Image (cartoon, rainbow, N blue to C red):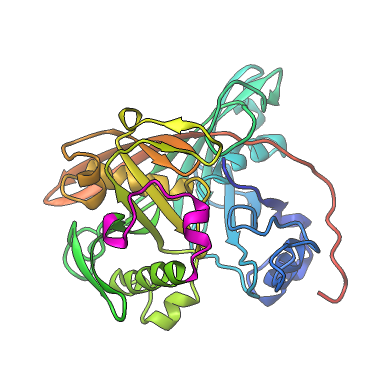
Amino acid sequence: GTSKGVFFRLQDLPAAAQVPGPARDALLLRVIGSPDPYGKHTDGMGGATSSTSKVVILSASTQPGHDVDYLYGQVPINDSFIDWSGNCGNLSAAVGPFAVSNGMVEPSRVPYNGTCAVRIWQANIGKTIIAHVKITDGKVQETGDFELDGVTFPAAEIVLEFINPADEGESECGGGAMFPTGNLVDELEVPGVGLFKSTMINAGVPVVFVEAAALGYDGTELQGDINEDKAAMAKLEAIRVHGAVRMGLVGDAAQAAKRPLTPKLVFVAPPKDFVSSSGKPVHAAEIDLLARAMSMGKLHHAMMGTASVAIAAAAAVPGTLANVAAGGGLREVVRFGHPSGTMRVGADVKQLDGRWAVSKAVMSRSARVLMDGAVRVPDDF
């Protein structure tokens, strides 16, 4: 997808880094090159953006009916910790091909030519993802004509199914946990910033939705419009932090500030013509709504895969801010505009006993191996 990460097989890590703890995090931080006060990741494998500062650990699955266990870590650029609280929907696309190529899928299930359905256990959030990987002449096919806005070159299409991506059970407020507050829209008061209408949802990843207009935006913003405005970024982070507390993800704002990966903040608006970051015109008639997402304190250059699941789920539920921006009504598929272009995501959402639930979200991504080998880490990391 629109992310890049460093993947490890669990057994290839040093013994001390094969279990959660400071040794594992210290090693992976050094691999990426964080913390880096210069914000460049020159001395590491990271790319100095939220989309390219990621690590993945894979192993044969311990879960019945699954092929591979997938653990994802988001590495901040300037901080010395790794956030293991969520998933990366884009890197999820690479897990299936990796599992096939590294013998994690039973050979009898891998066709010589065709598609292999790889069952992935997303260990961070305890959810199942099914990746449909194209196989040609017994090997993973990486090349193709599938184009994804935000990715430079075309590739083979990988269809991802996120199974039951919303949390199950009851929320503290009595509603289904897909909407942790029990409401489709809440009034979110952010001290020193203002009062905002918000839809808070947990589907794919926890997301706080707000209206672009309430922030003084129209939803066509690109990275330069947000990321160079320190006051705007501080305001958006304050909204995200207070949304995290309201959703019950953390106990207070201080804890939320130390958990930058989740929730995400997404602001939405009705369709409008805009020009993407690549110079490609996007017409209002091509999309259902506009969506812009903050990731690790910056405006994302495209859209996170997990946030796309949340957008599709929210847009399918009448009355949410995403649904209103898309014109209301029921929908199974949504196409939204993001800074790099457009994206199409489907969500199977139903209301059961007065509670909304999403059984599956589907999207297409791409993935390929950029290199494989050894990464050198100093002894004194």
Q: Residue 234 occupies which quadrant of the picture?
A: bottom left
Residue 92: percent from the left, percent from the top?
Answer: 55, 45
Residue 266: percent from the left, percent from the top?
Answer: 37, 55
Q: Tell which of 344 and 182 is nearer to you.
A: 344
**Residue visible at 27% across and 42% down in the picture:** 270
Residue furthest toward the left?
A: 354
Residue 77: percent from the left, percent from the top?
Answer: 64, 67
Residue 368: percent from the left, percent from the top?
Answer: 68, 35
**Residue visible at 79% across and 61% down in the picture:** 42
Q: Tell which of 163 and 108 is nearer to you.
A: 163
Q: Residue 21 occupies which quadrant of the picture?
A: bottom right
Would residue 86 be seen by someone viewing this image from the given angle? yes
**Residue visible at 65% across and 57% down in the picture:** 55
375 vs 287, left or right, is right
The range drawn in magenta is 213-230
Name the quadrant of the N terminus.
top right
Name the quadrant of the C terminus.
bottom right
Q: Residue 168 occupies which quadrant of the picture?
A: bottom left
11 vs 227, left or right, is right
Does the magenta portion include 221?
yes
Does the magenta portion include 38?
no
